[in-house]
Amino acid sequence: MTETMQLGDMLRRRGISRRALLKYASYMASLMALPPSVAGAMAEGLAKARRQAVIWLSFQECTGCTESLTRSFSPSLEELIFDFISLDYHHTLQAASGEAAEAARRQSMRENQSKYLVVVDGSVPTADGGVYSMIAGRTNMDVLAETVEHAAAVIAVGTCASFGGLPEADPNPTGAVPITKLVTGKPVINIPGCPPLPQAMAGTLTHFLSFGTLPELDALHRPRAFFGETIHDRCYRRSFYERGLFAKSFDDDGARQGWCLYELGCKGPVTYNACASLKWNGAVSFPIQSGHGCIGCSEPRFWDRGGLYKPLSAGTADVRKLIGIAAVAGVALGAGAAALARQRRASTSATEQ
Amino acid sequence: MELLDFARGPALAFGLVVFVVGSLWRLAGVLLLPRMRDLSPARDGAPPAPLAALRTVLRRMWPRKEFAQATLFPTINSYVFHLGLALVVFGLAPHILFIRSLTGLTWPGLPSNLVYGVGVITLASLFAALARRLGHPVLRLLSHSGDYVSWLLTTLPVVTGLLATSHLGARYETLLAIHILSISALLVWFPFGKLMHAVLFVFSRGATGMRFSHRGVNV
Amino acid sequence: MEELTGTAAAAARFDVGSGVAEALLRQVARLLEALARDPGFADVIDLRSLPMHDADRASLRERLGNGEIDASFDLVGKTRITETACAGVWWVRHANSDDCAVLEQIVVARVPALLLAHPADIEGAARRLATELGAPTHRETIHD
Amino acid sequence: MSAASAPRPAFDRQGERSDEARVDGAMRSFVREFGVTAALHMESCVRCGMCAEACHFYVATGEAKYTPVYKLEPFRRAYLREAGPFAPLVRGLGLVKKLRIDELQQWQELIYDSCTMCGRCTMVCPMGIDIAELVKEARHGMFKAGLIPDRLALMDRTAQQWGSPATPAEDLPDILADVAKQYGVRIPCDLPQADILVTAAPAELVEHTKALADAAKILNRIGAKWTMHHGGFDASNIGFNNGDMQLQERLTRAIVDTALQIGAKIVLLPECGHAYGAARWEAAKWYGRALPVRIVHMTEFLAELIASQRICVKKIGETATFHDPCQIVRRGGLEAAPRQVLAALGLELIEMKDHGVGAYCCGGGGGVVSNARAVPLRHKVFEIKRQQIEATGAKRFVTSCGQCHITFDMGAKYAHWDKKTESLLEIVADNLAE
């Protein structure tokens, strides 16, 4: 199924003109915070690119990431990406199943050796030899290792693949681990989020297709274009934070006026993602705009970092019982010290007489 | 375990526990020492002891006119950073939330930008206090390492707090973590250094107030 | 318009009028002067990444006014290019398939690149038309 | 130029005990002081240095070592090691060094020569620490260590034998008889029965005997049934100044027991500062709550007599300024009494810049005036008071404490200052209306 034709010609046959490509490229350039002038070069790059083979591996995942990207309820600009790539293996989307599906995967790996992309969705269980998630009788770990071996790059989509996400949350019975833990020697890009922004996924792929290189990544391998700033930095309610106007409960007068949700546990300040600027569901809204604080879903261990509704400035440990015991211990120690002092004082006057 | 999780979790909990144990240990250790009552007949017309104590605690908030001139700078500068610290700690919304998470008490906060300004003034005042402690011969003679540790652990939270709010120097969660760690350090040191005067001053002034009102003198 | 949605409500009650619109107008003026001096000049201002309330954007749109051309495209969702009252200044609005504006730009050029038919598209069309008419599709014939 | 004698060590020493015994003696005494109040004060100092601004020794010399709270350094270290809540930790981890003999010796000059225990520092301390009281408690330890100025030690020994640092008890009757004859006034002595036991200050038994006569004149005028008694006649209580608790107890008991013995209801203290501190406020240390007699200071006695019209005084229409003796006014609470007497005398009172509870000390109290080693320092400090008195421009200068009186006389002589110091008692006695 390898495509020798250039992407541009192939798309045109499918009714997607170079103008559409230019529109797509300028949109993507804007998302990637690249200068508008880059759009032209990006469109040309896309047109000349070969159709990119992509193998999508789904492990311990809830298909939320696929849902977010394919956005089945109404086709969007992001989905154009699926016309640029040949999705050779995707449990949910592909027609083939069982052995046929596996055969398709191996064939694509052979034909596009060291040129295909591996997209991983979901974390990989490692406990008890990885038996907790298997495909066609083989553990996710084996499938991952085998598939990744000749890949050009690996894209971990969603917080589960990037950082372990919910499967890895305490107590982590399956010993789930993020992809970066298992894949070494290959460039890995993390696109966290639960689910991740479709624009982030599409933007990363487009950047790879049009420029042939991976976008600039940060310390956690996340594309800086989408994960360079915190929600708090781009939040439209920031002016209320500065003025100290905070909603006290989810439906009080402050909340209705769109005041800052810091007091209701918003984790915007410590969460790196582009929800506040790109927004969701076709730039309609994002969690904070709909009145709920950001829960930091694109950060590692977001599930175990103290309650979602506990404000950032409050401690995560429940210390009240602890402080009760500490108080008793303190007074006891004080009484002991005082008794000791009295006793030492008495001993001095005793020897004095 | 990310730095922020460590700071917000175990570090803060440890700080709070040591703070409570240490403070009550020191307070109980002092207040349970033998009481040496003054059994001499009181000056007639002397007010009851607790009232006298309270009056002295309030009266001593400002120096007598004989000393106001000579102690003008330390008095005013101390009030600047004491009120500054109070406004910052009890005025900023995130701080109020922290206190609410511990005590359940809550009250309306001040605009964050205003508190930020107060924080800068407080910081300047704290540095002025340090300059005086290093420069003035009397203070240089009196001061020992505990005073400088207390100064440092009082100033660090202000510095890190200002850095955190202005997102300077590192990512926000690192700055916030460092700020919370500096709070834990302050809480751990609090009972063992001179910061305990924040609690002891009431008893100390009260004791002297009682002693002298018994004699008919309003100190 | 009963209950305004989140942002609109906040913006309406706290109309900051942050002056971004004003600044952008000055930038457009500068670019227009450059275009006046050099017809080949072209530049694009991306409005999506600027911290602008809808009110700001609307006032900017109003200030620029309308020209003679109002082109709409159907490219995986609507796109509309409107010439503003100032010749050479175009307002581009890309929308998604559910007509939600995903990108808005101000283009300062004689004509925005998107309006021009792309050579590759032309070549494809020429080939298609030629096969349709049964005539040879030799490249020379197109040019002479 | 006589051969330069070996430079006198900056401290005196009594007895032959070893250094360890002295330090141990001091520590044992310090430990007994740390009740709640002393502990609270030791815990609350924030080393803000404001007490220096109130202390005449620092203000006059500008030397940091005279900072009042610095005088408590050995006392504070003893507290932290022995009685503080963290004492076991402090001892265990060696956080605070043990007191050394050389430190105690070095601090003798700070605790005795440069502190009159006037308590002005107590008035400024933002933490309300009663530094003067703590210095007095520190003196208990210094006395136990045998490290007090020799001159005071000498007076202490004589007081232990004679009941007064200046006059043997057995000489009292003769002295009183001479004074009675000299001033033509009746001074009963050793009456078996009396309502008021009158006591004197040491100087009054030697050179300022007129004070005795004046007191006698007034007491006879009101027809009081009073006497002095060789059992308890000197109220100045040198033990209070030196830190000798045993002597302080003996001298206090001598007076109160003698009063009981003769059935006196009132013990009249002379115009003396530490007499008031020791008898009025600390007698209860040994008698508990039911102090059997009423302790009255001469100043408040005069005020009561005038207020109750038991005596009337002639009006003197002159200007005067008043020095508030620290132990009587700031630490005694008798700020109003002397002013009522001056008003009755028709003296136009011009207050000094710092007066009443905030007044500067004369610089001689707390044993400093008797401490020869402290003379140069005392003269420097005296200048502050002298200028404030000059600044009032008042014609007469009055005070109501013998110790201050001596300090002013000696200070004036040194400073060639012609101002005459008058005693309140004396003016009242000289101006009794018929």
Image (cartoon, rainbow, N blue to C red):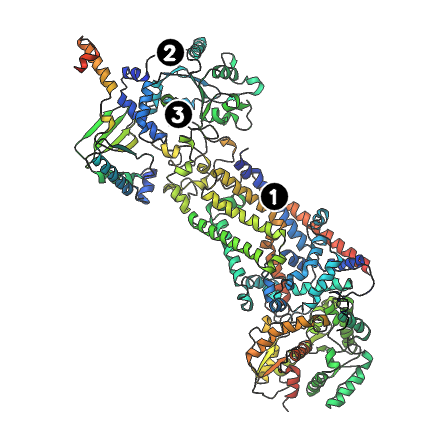
The secondary element bearing badge 2 is classed as loop
A255 relative to D343, above or below: above
Which amino acid does the dot numbered 1 rest on? Val
Q: Residue at x 18, y 8 (%)?
A: C134
Instruction: Mark 1 vs mark 2: give the one in front.
Output: 2
Q: Amino acid at mark 3?
A: Thr
| First reached walking from the N terminus: tag 3 or tag 2 | 2
Asked if residue B205 is positioned above or below residue A262 in the image, the reply reads below
Q: Position of residue A254 (x, y in %)?
A: 39, 44
Which mark is on residue A204? 3
Q: Are marks 1 and 2 on the same chain?
A: no
Foreground pick, C31 / B129: C31
Q: Nearer the viewer, residue C49 or B195?
A: C49
* Residue C40 or residue D292, whichever sits in front: C40
Residue A199: percent from left, percent from top: 37, 27
Chain letter of disc 1?
A: B
Q: Chain of mark 2?
A: A
* Residue D51 visible in the picture: yes
In 3D space, how far apart are the residues under numbered discs 3 and 2 (Cα atoms)? 22 Å
The answer for how far apart the CA atoms under marks 1 and 3 are is 47 Å
Above or below — where is C44 with respect to D19?
above
What residue appears at the point 64 percent right and 63 percent down from the top-left corner? D68
- Residue that mark 1 sits on: B17
Label placed on residue B44: none
Q: Which residue is mark 2?
A: A2
Please give left or right for residue D226 compared with residue B101 in the image: right
